[in-house]
Amino acid sequence: MTETAALVEEGNFLMPDRPYTVVDADRDRLTAFGDHLVALHDELRRDIAALREEAAQLPARGEVGDPLVLPHRLHGHCLSFCEALDAHHTTEDRSIFPFLAQHHPELSEVLDRLAADHRIMAALLADLRTVAATPSVPDFHADLERLSVELLTHLDREEHYLVPVLNSLTHLPEH
């Protein structure tokens, strides 16, 4: 299991069950909320880079006579990454984005764009899962690259617009 999947499973980036108002002693913990998002994104970046590196070791399309079969380890890594990314986006869509939309209406267009990114990546994740689950994976490299480009662009956009806001919050969302 990747570190990202473990974080998802442990609920380390889920929001508390009640509003949280900041007092001076809690400012560092709350300020770390945006920074924690960056740390989660960095883990996703490392995971997608590792997947791309593993995939680069596979023969290119047409280099082998038999259908290309994804090695068990790469298959598991791929599915674990897909699950972690999907869980991360679900948390953002259900908790963080609605909270930010309510308290920071100036982010409306940005949040709409980020949610649209999530829908695009959900379709790419579904494609990658399908390709990874088949015995022959001729399109695995291409599907992984499409996801990688979309994901890396999205993470940069999300951090650019949301981390300063998350680090300036005076309370956390309810969920």
Image: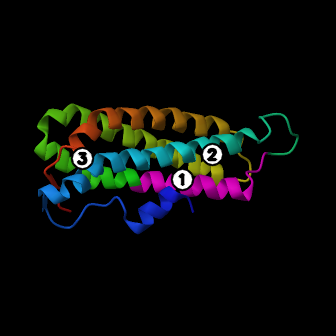
* Residue at numbered disc 2: 51
| Residue 173 makes an appearance in the image | no
User: What residue span does the magenta drawing correspond to?
Assistant: 68-87
| Residue 7 makes an appearance in the image | yes
Give me the C-alpha separation between circle 1 and circle 2: 9 Å
Residue at x 68%, y 41% (from the top left corner): 53
Left or right: residue 57 versus residue 111 is right
Q: Secondary structure at mark 1?
A: helix
The percent coordinates of residue 122 (x first, y second) are 44, 46
Give me the C-alpha separation between circle 3 and circle 1: 22 Å
Locate the C terminus by quadrant.
bottom left
Residue at x 66%, y 55% (from the top left corner): 75
- Amino acid carrying mark 2 in the image: Leu
Label 1 neighbourhood size at 10 Å, few (<14), some (14-19), many (20+)? Answer: many
Q: Secondary structure at mark 2?
A: helix
* Residue at numbered disc 1: 81
Label 3 neighbourhood size at 10 Å, few (<14), some (14-19), many (20+)? Answer: many
* Residue at numbered disc 3: 97
**Secondary structure mostly seen in the magenta stretch:** helix
- Specify the color scheme: rainbow
Left or right: residue 169 versus residue 83 is left
Residue 110 or residue 31, whichever sits in front: 31
